[in-house]
Amino acid sequence: EDQVTQSPEALRLQEGESSSLNCSYTVSGLRGLFWYRQDPGKGPEFLFTLYSAGEEKEKERLKATLTKKESFLHITAPKPEDSATYLCAAYNTDKLIFGTGTRLQVFP
Amino acid sequence: DTAVSQTPKYLVTQMGNDKSIKCEQNLGHDTMYWYKQDSKKFLKIMFSYNNKELIINETVPNRFSPKSPDKAHLNLHINSLELGDSAVYFCASSPDRKNSPLHFGNGTRLTVT
């Protein structure tokens, strides 16, 4: 069965303390790996799509990478406004399968 | 300039009642979705419509009935509400049925008492 697993469930960082979030996937016929950010009371907001192993995408302090089994979201020198839940999702042949997310808190 | 809008934002109702959630997108997308997010933040697809045609129906109880009057609207009607239906329901849209990013609404928090 297709599955997406994220770790850690929660992460607390000091402002400026870089770290990485992991997304492991077991999906047949992967057609894309997506990262979303979700703030409390809001819907998920699209960040990146990665389509093939070795691909990398960057946006401000975030960089997403993809291998054949997992994806990483690297956060460099995070700020308190980066606090949110980060969701990973894998697109198989017909639908998007989400992980349960990593809740990130960045303290000043 | 809201892209995907849902109403209502909050819905509190008693067991056994029937309720509806409405969704509209102004992005010109062909495909729309309903997702359910449980208390552990897990997002699971329920339904997907492409140009008003149902294309995904994930083992959802038949108390849930989606309706798409046109490709910009996808409503969700729920009959005989149960306690386990309490969750946040998200509407989303994408340009097509392929692997394009989904754009989500801000959700409807349904509480069944």
Image (tube, grey):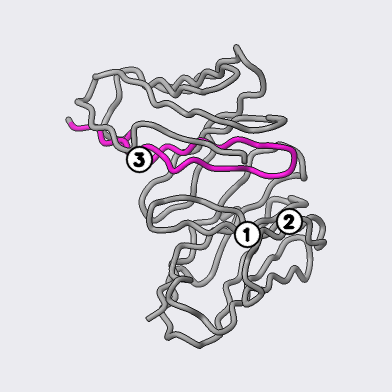
Instruction: Give the SS element for disc 3.
Output: strand
How far apart are labels 1 and 2 at the CA level? 8 Å
Kind of residue at badge 3: Ala
Give the labeled residue for mark 3: A84
Q: Is residue B37 above or below residue B19?
A: above
Horizontal and vertical percent for residue B6?
A: 55, 65
Is the same chain shared between marks 1 and 3? Answer: no
Query: Magenta includes B82?
Result: no
The magenta segment: A81-107
Q: Is residue A87 left or right of residue A50?
A: left
Kind of residue at badge 2: Ile
Give the labeled residue for mark 2: B56
Question: Answer yes or no: do the residues labelled 2 and 3 have beta carbons within 8 Å?
Answer: no
* Numbered disc in front, either 1 or 3: 1
How far apart are labels 2 and 3 at the CA level? 29 Å
Kind of residue at badge 1: Met
Give the labeled residue for mark 1: B46
Instruction: Give the SS element for disc 2.
Output: strand
- At horizontal 63% and vertical 73% (from top left) the residue drawn is B64
Mark 2 Cα-neighbour bin, 10 Å: few <14, some 14–19, many ≥20:
some
Residue A98 location, quadrant: top right
How far apart are labels 1 and 3 at the CA level? 24 Å
Query: Magenta includes A97?
Result: yes
Residue B23 location, quadrant: bottom right
Upstream in sequence: badge 1 or badge 2: 1
Instruction: Give the SS element for disc 1.
Output: strand
* Numbered disc in front, either 2 or 3: 2
Horizontal and vertical percent for residue B41?
A: 42, 51
